[in-house]
């Protein structure tokens, strides 16, 4: 476990949280909210179609 922690610490960029915060500030996820909802639905539907164990993700949903 110590080895994995040391490996993680070496690989981690110490400024990742600043970079993530800046990226979130520059991105307006709500800009195309309807498109995001449709994209998420399609991705979930695709996962359910390709992974029988994921069928519960869209069970009872309607087609958009």
Image: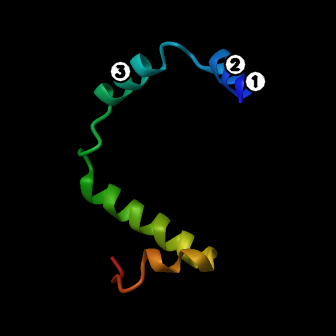
Answer few, some or many: residues within 10 Å of disc 3's Cα (few below 14, many 20 plus, some between 14 and 19).
few
Q: Is residue 26 above or below residue 13?
A: below
Q: Secondary structure at mark 3?
A: helix
User: Is residue 50 shown left or right of residue 61?
Assistant: right
Q: Quadrant of residue 60?
A: bottom left
Q: CA distance from mark 2 to mark 3?
A: 27 Å
- Is there a contact, CB below 8 Å, between mark 1 and mark 2? yes
Q: Which residue is mark 1?
A: 3
Name the quarter where the N terminus is drawn.
Answer: top right
Q: Secondary structure at mark 2?
A: helix
Q: Is residue 51 above or below residue 13?
A: below
Front residue of this view, candidates 38 and 49:
49
Q: Position of residue 7 (x, y in %)?
A: 72, 22
User: Is residue 58 shown left or right of residue 32?
Assistant: right
Res 33 label: none
- Residue closest to the far right: 3
Q: Is residue 14 above or below residue 8?
A: above
Q: Secondary structure at mark 1?
A: helix
Q: CA distance from mark 1 to mark 2?
A: 5 Å
Residue plotted at (35% across, 82% down): 61
Q: Position of residue 47 (x, y in %)?
A: 55, 69
Q: Earlier in the sequence, mark 3 or mark 1?
A: 1
Front residue of this view, candidates 3 and 45:
3
Residue plotted at (48% across, 20% down): 16
Q: CA distance from mark 3 to mark 1?
A: 31 Å
Q: Which residue is mark 3?
A: 22
Q: Which residue is mark 2?
A: 6
Nearer the camera: disc 2 or disc 3: 2
Q: Is residue 24 above or below residue 37?
A: above
Answer few, some or many: residues within 10 Å of disc 2's Cα (few below 14, many 20 plus, some between 14 and 19).
few
Q: Earlier in the sequence, mark 2 or mark 3?
A: 2
């Amino acid at each position: 476990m110590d080895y994995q922690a040391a490996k993680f610490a070496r690989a981690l960029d110490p400024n990742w949280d600043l970079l993530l915060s800046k990226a979130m500030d520059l991105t307006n996820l709500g800009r195309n909210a309807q498109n995001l909802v449709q994209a998420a639905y399609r991705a979930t539907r695709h996962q359910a179609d390709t992974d029988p164990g994921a069928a519960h993700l869209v069970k009872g949903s309607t087609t958009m």
